[in-house]
Amino acid sequence: MCNKPRLTVLALLAVMTMVTSAVFAQPFGDQFARKDLGQYAENARLIRPDQASFEPLEGRQVLRLTKSASVTFKDVPIDPTVKYALTFRGRFEGDGEAIEENPHLDFLTAYRGVPSIFAGREVQFLDAEKRVLRSLSSALVFREWFEYRDVFYAPPKSKYVRLTIKSGREDQVYFVDNIQLQPAADEGAINCNPVPDRYGKYNYSGWQTLAVGAKMIELPDGRVAFDTKYGTSGATFPLAKPGKYTLTTISQENGFNYAVVLNFLDEEGKKISSINGWGNGKPYEAVLPAGATQGSLLFYSNVIEEVRVNYVGQ
């Protein structure tokens, strides 16, 4: 009879410890179960006890921020070839203006920066030396609980992602709940957020540089679309396989020099070539040019209902 190896109690405890350490190696995903800011925040020593605390709220453990607190969470290793979703719930209390009271604040939900009087979030992508390669920032303007979602690829050469949440004005209190970072669900496209209606009119995932006046809008039938105005561009996305790719757009012409462009770029972001499409739902095909490793979208005078870049093979 063969003697099967058995784990001793000490060995089993060691394995469990390693597994637990791996699970909690990053600061997201445990709903603040450890109740120790030092376990989550890189700058915990710089934050006063009256600025940040953990407390139960509505049956959940939340992080409470106030007195203009700014919490920078610990850096998380990241793979620039993977599409990620960073999500959390948040709401604020205080005399500051909220989107529920002033719908015109919807422009602050785009990646345009955060005025200091508002709560805000910043997502930074860092290289191996912890230098910032790119960042996304927008205001947190909902008084009631709202799920914020950023779907993205990190830029080439990224090694880490860093999240910072600021509570805003001195007398405002901001509550953060259930931060998670994980690979994004299949969106049916390589590019991020191909159907604006999927995440709603307050989500600008995938759009890096917005033209003046560009914003999410509601169509007459209630669906959400993206009015690009003149010259909005998207964030880069990896094109990892040689062969054919398609650009498919469903959109409406809205202004001068209507155009839909897919740019092919090298690793440094230099344009190699491009293809033009139209918003008629027809796939426009191109072979990935030599040296191209990523793509980006550029739009002039479009109201986008769908835009998809897909790989179709050799």
Image (cartoon, rainbow, N blue to C red):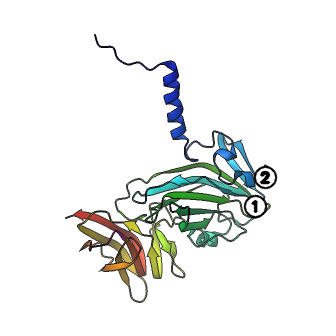
Location of residue 281 (image quadrant): bottom left
- Image quarter in which the C terminus is found: bottom left
Q: Which residue is painted at 65% across and 58% down in the image?
A: 165
Q: Which residue is painted at 43% across and 76% down in the image?
A: 303
Label 1 vs 2, first from the N-terminus:
2
Q: Name the residue under label 2.
A: 48
Asked if residue 11 is positioned above or below residue 108 in the image, the reply reads above
Amino acid beneath label 2:
Arg
Closer-to-camera residue (31/26): 26
Amino acid beneath label 1:
Ser
Asked if residue 27 is positioned above or below residue 106 in the image, the reply reads above
Give the residues drawn in magenta, as a range.
289-294
Q: Name the residue under label 1.
A: 68
Asked if residue 21 is positioned above or below residue 131 in the image, the reply reads above
Measured from the top left, where is residue 245 in percent x and y? 27, 68
Tags 1 and 2 touching, CB below 8 Å: no
Measured from the top left, where is residue 236 in percent x and y? 42, 69
Closer-to-camera residue (66/90): 66
Disc number at residue 173? none
Task: Examine the rendering and report whether any part of residue 219 can be seen.
Answer: no
Say few, some or many: other residues with alpha carbon within 10 Å of mark 2 (under 14 / 14 to 19 / 20 or more). few
Q: Is mark 2 on a helix, strand or loop?
A: loop
Q: Which residue is painted at 57% across and 58% down in the image?
A: 162
Q: How far apart are the alpha carbons under marks 1 and 2?
A: 11 Å
Q: Which residue lies furthest to the bottom in this view?
A: 256
- Image quarter in which the N terminus is found: top left
Tell me if 60 is positioned left or right of 67 in this view: left
Which secondary structure is most common in the magenta stretch?
Answer: loop
Q: Which residue is painted at 71% across and 69% down in the image?
A: 116
Tell me if 308 is positioned left or right of 27 in this view: left
